[in-house]
Amino acid sequence: MNAINKEPARSEDIRALDAEHHLHPFTDTHALNAKGARVIERAEGVYLWDSEGNRIIDGMAGLWCVNIGYGRKELAEAAYTQMNQLPYYNTFFQTTTSPATQLAKELAVLTPGDLNHIFFANSGSEAIDTVIRMVRRYWEVMGKPWRKTLIARNNAYHGSTIGGTSLGGMGAMHNQGGPFLPGIEHIRQPYWYGEADGQSPETFALTCAQALEEKILEVGPDNVAAFVGEPIQGAGGVIVPPEGYWAEIQKICRKYDILLVADEVICGFGRTGNWFGSQTLDIKPDLISMAKGLSSGYQPISAVAVGERVASALIEKGGEFYHGFTYSGHPVAAAVALENLRILREEKIIEQVRDVTGPYLQQQLRERLGNHPLVGHIEGVGLIAGMALAQDKAQHKLFDSNLDVGTICRNHCFANGLIMRACGNRMVLSPPLVITKAEIDEMLDKALLCLDLTVASLKEMGVTLGS
Ligand SMILES: *Cc1c(COP(=O)(O)O)cnc(C)c1O
């Protein structure tokens, strides 16, 4: 193309250009180009429309982020107003802006405990990179620069920058583009259904938490800076740790004086029925990373909330912290996030998740899908849920990952007007927080249909299933 086409493009043209020039994230471009990308054109509430006019119910809130749903004009107006008044200014030059300052105040109030200081970035990955540098810097300031090691978990997702990939525990990511950051260790994940090997949830919770203590002792307690975990693992397949896990993790962190970081990029802003997953799971973190739901995805913005312990050391004794981004505290993104928080608060959307739609989704999922022959186990809280697909449910036999059963199911969903994501052999749901009971019913009707279609596909492929 030697000119930018100003005519509204037809979807075949968009697909052709997309194939020619666009490298998609987390995508096999060759495979995508063979069939062409689906063009999403507009959205309202919990629904998307593609360029063929199909209406799709978005069971993933975009990528776990469109918490207030699509089409809220107030956010567009907040962006428009701010862009006209001050589209950009930085916060490096001893300068600030009203939206960045107000948002910092608002987040200090909403976050639990004494997390009263806010550092802004633009994505979850950048927030995680900020965490890595900030906790290491904290220990330097405290006169223990040897405390460098961060401990995270296998199958954790902490973003896709070099820092996020290193800290995350995704094997497939670690197989590409290394070497990764030194000073990062991983322990087992608290995935009871998949990895407990017959242990009760209570015992397994302790076994997994004790893996942290073992790792600390292996690395040397005086070398460990922080432990980082998602309150509920998201991209790992929505894994809710068994009762007792976080209490034990926190006990161990306190015992060895190790900072605790909650990566709330998915759990934050109402997903679990409270403002933060830390409140739902009773975690008292020293730092929280947040992104996605902070602006409901209407603008890219992220933040790290910092508790008194780290903030006061950095402020009183740290001098200049050589870290930040051109768009840290971007005024337009901050104005949009503020409007998003106002809507979440004034419309009592999170209370609705906690008291009505969250319990309804969890109950209906178990009642309607729990007995399906493919569904081995369902877990979740609020409006986030994951289910393990099992080849033989009674025998607790999971599918071979080469079969890619999750993708088979996901493709049926896509073809039938539902976005339900596959994370390996786990199907996950994380709809906009404004979803109604009737829309939950519709979402689960489609999910059930697609599970049946998956069974049919597997039979056609000659895969034997349990009774
Ligand atoms: C999505 C996600 C990230 C990365 O956020 P990006 O905005 O994609 O960089 C980090 N941590 C968790 C828990 C996430 O779910």
Image: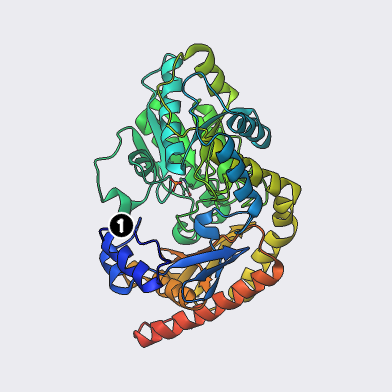
Rendered image quadrant of residue 334: top right
Percent across and percent down for residue 156 are 43, 48
Instruction: Say which quarter of the image contains residue 187.
Output: top left
Q: Position of residue 310 (x, y in %)?
A: 53, 23
The quarter of the image holding the N terminus is bottom left
The one of 88 and 307 positioned closer to us in this rendering: 88
Residue 195 sits above or below residue 90 on the image: below
Q: Residue at x 49, y 66 (%)?
A: 41
Question: Is 357 positioned to the left or the right of 124 in the image?
Answer: right
> Observer-nearest residue: 75 or 249?
75
Looking at this view, is 78 or 234 the one in front?
A: 78
Above or below, 418 against 232 in this view is: below
| Image location of residue 104, percent across then percent down | 61, 31
> Which residue is denoted by mark 1 in the rendering?
23
Q: Is residue 433 visible?
A: yes
Residue 257's place in the image compared with 40, above or below, is above
Amino acid type of the residue tagged 1 in the rendering: Leu
Q: Residue at x 53, y 48 (%)?
A: 292
